[in-house]
Every structure is written in C-alpha cells, then in structure tokens.
Image (cartoon, rainbow, N blue to C red):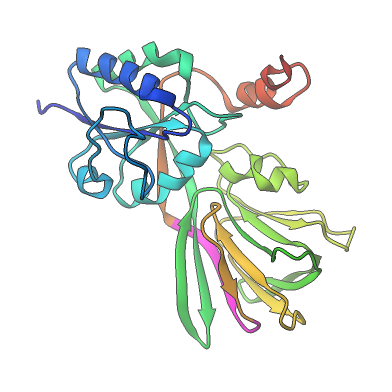
C-alpha cells in the first residue's frame, strides 16, 4: 500500500506562527502519512509560513490524496476550483469566524487520527459553471462553490437585470444586483440578502436579489437542470461587475450575457465527525448559539 500524501494549506493570516499546521503535521506523520506544505495564495511574503519550505500547490496536487486547509471558509472557497479540477477531497480546519464549510475547529485536531484507516465519508457539493458571452463568444469562464454575484460598482446606484431560465423569462430586477448561489452558498451572501437556508448537499440553485425595489420578488429556489441567463438592461455606462466566490471583479458591458449552470465538477468535503448541518447552523447562527457567546 502506497503512503498517502496530504497537502497542508495554511492561511498565514489565520494560523499565526503555523501553530495549528505544525500540530496537524505531527499527528498526520505519527499515523503514517507524508505531508507537504503549500500556500493557498500567490505572492505570499517571505517568512509568512515560519520555517516551512513552501511547495508549488498545482505541482503537489498531481500526486496528492487529500488537501487540508487551515483558515476560514474563504480559504476553502479560494481552493475549491483547483481541488475540484484535480478531484482532490478537502478537509477544512476552521481558524476564522463562522466556518460552515470547514469540518473541524482548531481545537479538534486530534480528530485527524481518524484518517489512519482511510475509511471516511465525503460530501459532494454542487458547483456552478459561470460564463460571460460577449458578441456571441465566451470571454470569461469560472467555477464556483458558493455563488455568482452581479452587482453595482463602488458608487451605489440602481441596476436593471433581466433573468431568464432556459430562454424563458423568469424575473426583472431593479436594485443593487442579484446572487445565484448553490446550497453551500445559501448561508453566505445570499442569506445576508434575505435568501433561504438550503441544506448544503441538496441540488438546487437559489436566485436572490440584492436590495430589490420590487418587494413582490424575494428569491427563487430552482432545479439545477436549468441554465440561467442574466442580461443587463438600461444601465448605460453604470459600472456593473461579476464576482464568482468573491473572486476578482470582472467588469460587464451593456450587451453581455452571464450564463450560470450546474457544473459537472463537485467539491468533495471530508467528514470525520457526526455533526449535522442543522446542528452547526443552530450553534453558530441562532440565538444562544456559539456565535453569541462571549
């Protein structure tokens, strides 16, 4: 049996001094795994990873069996595309805030010993393919675990969007924009904008307007079989941007079409505990939960 290789991806802004990474590395090596440390981000400052030699993530992924992140959910989102394309499962250790996607908290590292038998469950999380069509040609594509967001620029103004599903009119939005989220993303920006909470292993797309002027329209929960098209209307030269999983903004032009559909790729999240989504949500979000304790 070949020795399993595990990539450790710490966010140096969260894991100060690499303390959690070093503790996890010690446990994983004790139970027989090979480990390598890679940066989740480009252009990190020298010394950000303490005394670790940091290796190239794309290169190390080719022969790896598991990716362990140390940070918040944002770190997992940043790595989800690369992990999905390489069919590499992800185990998140939460060093940040709420941490809905991460499996373990920083104080639960001993749970990593359950990996020894390599008999664990994974959850397949739906992802979105996002494409911008300009002059009949695709000019931008991206893959997201959480959401695709179309919204106004830094100067607040009302933007007008037309949304269709498989070529049939679905909704007109006048407001700050729209969020198309996966079930995983339903507890992120979509929830803040008034969208529903969806069990993360479900297969749906949530369409949630941002500060809409049309009070009759709150949000839609749709089958993932649909292809959604978002078009800009009557916006003139007002800046409108597309964000996929909080990625760098992509500037949209007046006649662009944004296509959003379920991807063939999925993010596989490792599960080592018996925590249910409902339990996690209640602990972290509802009154009296962990998020409200001092």
Provide residue 15's location: percent of width, then percent of height.
43, 27
What residue appears at the point 50 percent right and 26 percent down from the top-left corner? 95
What residue appears at the point 31 percent right and 41 percent down from the top-left corner? 88
Q: Main secondary structure of the magenta part?
A: strand
Q: Nearer the viewer, residue 211 or 11?
A: 11
Q: Nearer the viewer, residue 73 or 20?
A: 20
Residue 31 makes an appearance in the image: no
Number of marks in the image? Answer: 0
Q: Is residue 14 left or right of residue 43?
A: right
Provide residue 111's location: percent of width, then percent of height.
39, 14
Which residue reaches farthest front? 46
Which residue reaches farthest bottom? 135
Provide residue 162's location: percent of width, then percent of height.
72, 74
Q: Nearer the viewer, residue 173 or 97?
A: 97
Which residue reaches farthest left? 1
Q: Nearer the viewer, residue 141 or 223?
A: 141
In the image, is residue 197 above or below residue 19? below
In the image, is residue 109 above or below residue 170? above
Q: Quadrant of the N terminus?
A: top left
Q: Quadrant of the C terminus?
A: top right
Q: Is residue 157 left or right of residue 4?
A: right
What residue appears at the point 39 percent right and 20 percent down from the top-left corner? 20
Q: Is residue 150 left or right of residue 23?
A: right
Q: Is residue 266 left or right of residue 53?
A: right
Q: Which residues are magenta?
A: 254-263
Magenta-colored stretch includes residue 256: yes
Magenta-colored stretch includes residue 118: no
């Amino acid at each position: 049996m070949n020795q399993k290789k595990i990539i450790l991806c710490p966010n140096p802004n969260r894991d100060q001094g690499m303390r959690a990474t070093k503790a996890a590395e010690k446990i994983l090596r004790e139970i027989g795994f090979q480990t390598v440390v890679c940066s989740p981000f480009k252009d990190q400052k020298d010394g950000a990873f303490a005394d670790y030699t940091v290796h190239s993530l794309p290169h190390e992924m080719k022969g790896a069996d598991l990716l362990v992140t140390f940070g918040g959910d944002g770190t997992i989102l940043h790595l989800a595309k690369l992990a999905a394309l390489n069919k590499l499962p992800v185990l998140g250790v939460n060093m940040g805030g709420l941490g809905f996607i991460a499996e373990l908290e920083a104080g639960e590292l001993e749970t990593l010993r359950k990996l020894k038998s390599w008999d664990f469950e994974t959850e397949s999380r739906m992802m979105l393919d996002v494409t911008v069509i300009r002059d009949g040609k695709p000019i931008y594509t991206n893959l997201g675990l959480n959401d695709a967001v179309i919204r106004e620029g830094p100067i607040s103004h009302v933007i007008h969007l037309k949304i269709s599903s498989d070529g049939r009119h679905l909704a007109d939005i006048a407001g700050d924009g729209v969020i198309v989220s996966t079930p995983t993303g339903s507890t992120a920006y979509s929830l803040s904008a008034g969208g529903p909470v969806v069990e993360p292993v479900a297969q749906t797309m949530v369409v949630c307007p941002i500060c809409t002027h049309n009070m009759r329209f709150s949000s839609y929960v749709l089958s993932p079989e649909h292809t959604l098209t978002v078009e800009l209307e009557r916006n003139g030269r007002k800046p409108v941007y597309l964000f996929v999983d909080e990625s760098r903004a992509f500037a949209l032009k007046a006649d662009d079409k944004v296509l959003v559909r379920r991807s063939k790729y999925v993010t596989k999240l490792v599960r080592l505990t018996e925590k249910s989504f409902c339990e996690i949500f209640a602990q972290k979000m509802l009154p009296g939960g962990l998020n409200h304790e001092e």
